[in-house]
Amino acid sequence: MIQSKTPARLLAVVVTALAALAAFVPGASAAVPNPGYTQFAGCPTAAENPKIELCLRNDITGGNFKMGSKNVPISKPIKLTGGTDSEFKNFAYNSEGGLSKVPQTVPGGVVGLTGLTWLLEFFGVNALSLYATPELAGTPDPNPFKEPIELPLKVHLTTPSGVLGNSCYVGSTSNPIKLNLIVGTTSPPPPNRQSARLDRR
């Protein structure tokens, strides 16, 4: 079971654009950002969502989340893009936005997570590689001037061989994993762990 843990050494870049209307080409190509704003392609245009006034992007480039006793490092960058109203509420995104689905390698694979070494005899090491893909399980609170920034997540578990099928998830919309991001890095006394780090640029 995955426990909700704040990832250590999490580096995120929060960028807030000007009004969304100024960042996109008007007319038929309204969903295409103007040059210099392509990083905000996931932000809805005024035509897609009239409530959106600001575009946001977070880049998560490190840290980890915990599955039982197993730490899963965030080794491949994940981005969150979308837009909000002027009060950083009503977060929304188009088909290019949301949380990018980037599989993270689970150390030890299925055997390392379950301890069921006999599975190796049937499937082999390569078939039992395990990947965890964080996905949004609700609406984030993306206000870059408030902490923590909360991401409700569910995690999609997959293997190259398809041993787990395509619908193995931990966490759900009704019971999400809550990832809390803060600005800076805390230094709590042992046995506490370092909290998340969120850098603003």
Image (cartoon, rainbow, N blue to C red):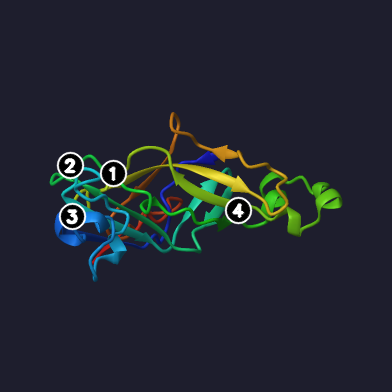
Q: Are marks 3 and 2 in contact (CB under 8 Å)?
A: no
* C-alpha distance separating marks 2 and 4: 36 Å
Residue 1 in sight in this render: no
Q: Amino acid at mark 1?
A: Ala
Of all residues shown, which one is farthest toward the right? 121
**In the image: residue 49, left or right of residue 77:** left
The image shows residue 83 at horizontal and vertical percentages of 24, 49
* C-alpha distance separating marks 1 and 2: 9 Å
* C-alpha distance separating marks 1 and 4: 27 Å
Would you place residue 59 above or below residue 180 in this image? Answer: below
The residue to which callout 3 is attached is 20
Residue under the image location 48 percent in, 48 percent down: 134
Label 1 vs 4, first from the N-terminus = 1
Q: Are marks 3 and 4 in contact (CB under 8 Å)?
A: no
Label 3 vs 2, first from the N-terminus = 3
The residue to which callout 2 is attached is 51
Q: Nearer the viewer, mark 3 or mark 4?
A: 3
Residue under the image location 18 percent in, 43 percent down: 50
Question: Residue 92, which numbered label?
Answer: 1
- Determine whether the residue tagged by mark 2 lies in a helix, strand or loop: loop
Label 2 vs 4, first from the N-terminus = 2
The residue to which callout 4 is attached is 131
Q: Amino acid at mark 3?
A: Ala
- Determine whether the residue tagged by mark 1 lies in a helix, strand or loop: loop
Q: Nearer the viewer, residue 101 or 60?
A: 101
Q: Are marks 2 and 4 in contact (CB under 8 Å)?
A: no
Q: Are marks 1 and 2 in contact (CB under 8 Å)?
A: yes
- Determine whether the residue tagged by mark 4 lies in a helix, strand or loop: strand
